[in-house]
Amino acid sequence: MLPTLFLQRMQALLGAEYGEFLAAYDRPRNVGLRLNPLKTKTPPDLSRFGLTPVPWADGGYYYNMDSRPGLSAYHEAGLYYLQEPSAMAPAGLLDVRPGMRVLDLCAAPGGKTTQLAAALQGQGLLVCNEIHPKRARILARNVERLAVANALVLNEHPQRLAERFSGFFDRILVDAPCSGEGMFRKEEAAVADWSPETVEMCARRQLEILRCAAGMLAPGGRLVYSTCTFAPQENEGTVSRFLAEAPDFTVAAAEAPWFAPGRPGWVENPAPGIERTFRLWPHKLNGEGHYAAVLEKRNDSAVETARCGRPSDLPSRGRPRRAAPTDPEALLQAFCKETGAALPEGRLLEFGQSLLLVPDGMPELHGLKVLRAGLELGQVLKNRFEPAHAWALWLKIARSAADFPADSPEIAAYLRGQTLSGPQTGWTLVTADGLSLGWAKGSGGSLKNHFPKALRRLA
């Protein structure tokens, strides 16, 4: 049951369109997935999922809800991310290109973050932040699953980041916390939590977040503000209030022929150009609903450039240093020679017992809550190297590999943590239809399972 006050507001706003809007709630919910080009450019046959393209998203597809692609081994391998189709729009509007510095300020659970990572193609720096610790851990897991090697996952308040990254980013996405009216069909909690007071509270918080984001954008940079709500106060209203106090920002003339225009007549004191923002209506396209505004910062805006740090600036957060006098880089190189495992571009960093490859141009991080930095390669334990699951997911091939069909009993057993049979010896990359899934270690005809215990399936 949709909230009565919500329905009354939408009827007053939409007028003759209201009947179509309401009828959209009687149709099946729109579900989608987005292929991950960081995993492979030539995905296996996915026709069983009944895919049809999402017109506004590269690699985005609607799927048949009964096909349940989230249960496939392809999902665990990071071949795709399950994402509501209209939620794929904001990242595309940001116009991210390889080599840029990009910030996803309100990033969990990671759908838009991994979409931005795909646009960067492994080049440049992607900082993704989430203020809530539990959601930040989910974000970090999805960054790992989709084989993103050039990301930095933080768990900070936007104000803390604004103090550290003045004028640092070429692109910023603010997918702001909102009243979630576009989530009503997916999450019952969104209906239960909704109220006019929630809309008011969200609008105040959104403006605060935009203020923080504005200072972190470089002159000439682009910022996309988005929500999954229909409330004008949180959409055209928030953007108009922000632009009234940020004269160095304007609404960009972005092209998006699939979307409806913003509605300046629905708010007091609409900003110039607010009609160039975008509304994604569930009765006008196959999506649950979204709002997006593309904002640009003038080239002559004055900022202080944030400092870039050295790898040693990464905080250890109290993790113990290794006592044994080993050479981590030598152990890593020996592992690469033995297995044929490749490495991405980046700088090697020893972090406690772990070895990481961090992206070039990583900013100074001392004092920040870092959940993931670059690509975790593995750990040096008692003068031996043990590879990380994140590295396995990033790899395309290895000299020693055990490949099985994705729907085979062997892959099902591997995902449950069971030992497999195979002639391989030493560290072996387990793959599903050629897609890397995790590590095993071969000896005597058996492959000991090293799929992370926390990710194993019960059945």
Image (cartoon, grey):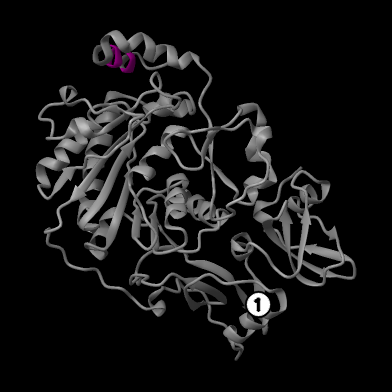
- Residue 131 highlighted magenta (yes or no): no
Q: Residues within 10 Å of mark 1 (few under 14, many from 20)?
A: some
Magenta span covers which residues?
Answer: 6-11
* Image side of residue 89 versus residue 64, left or right: left
Residue under the image location 24 percent in, 35 percent down: 203
- Does the image show residue 24? yes
In the rendered image, residue 372, in percent from the top left (x then y), is placed at 48, 63
Q: Is residue 193 visible?
A: no
Q: Residue furthest toward the bottom? A: 325
Q: Would residue 8 be counted in the magenta stretch?
A: yes
Residue sitting at x 21%, y 52%: 214
Under mark 1, the amino acid is Cys
User: Residue 102 at what x, y percent from top left?
Assistant: 34, 57
Q: Is residue 92 above or below residue 84?
A: below
> Image quadrant of residue 14?
top left
Q: Residue 206: where, in percent of width, then height?
A: 26, 41
Q: Position of residue 373 (x, y in %)?
A: 46, 66
Element assignment for label 1:
helix
Residue 200 higher or lower than 123, as above or below: above
Q: Residue furthest right?
A: 444
Name the residue beneath numbered marker 1. Answer: 336
Nearer to the camera, 3 or 350 = 350
The majority secondary structure of the magenta stretch comes to helix
Instruction: Please count the marks in the image.
Output: 1
Using the image as rendered, state which of residue 322 and residue 212 is in the foreground.
212
The C terminus sits in image quarter: top right
Quarter of the image where the N terminus is located = top left
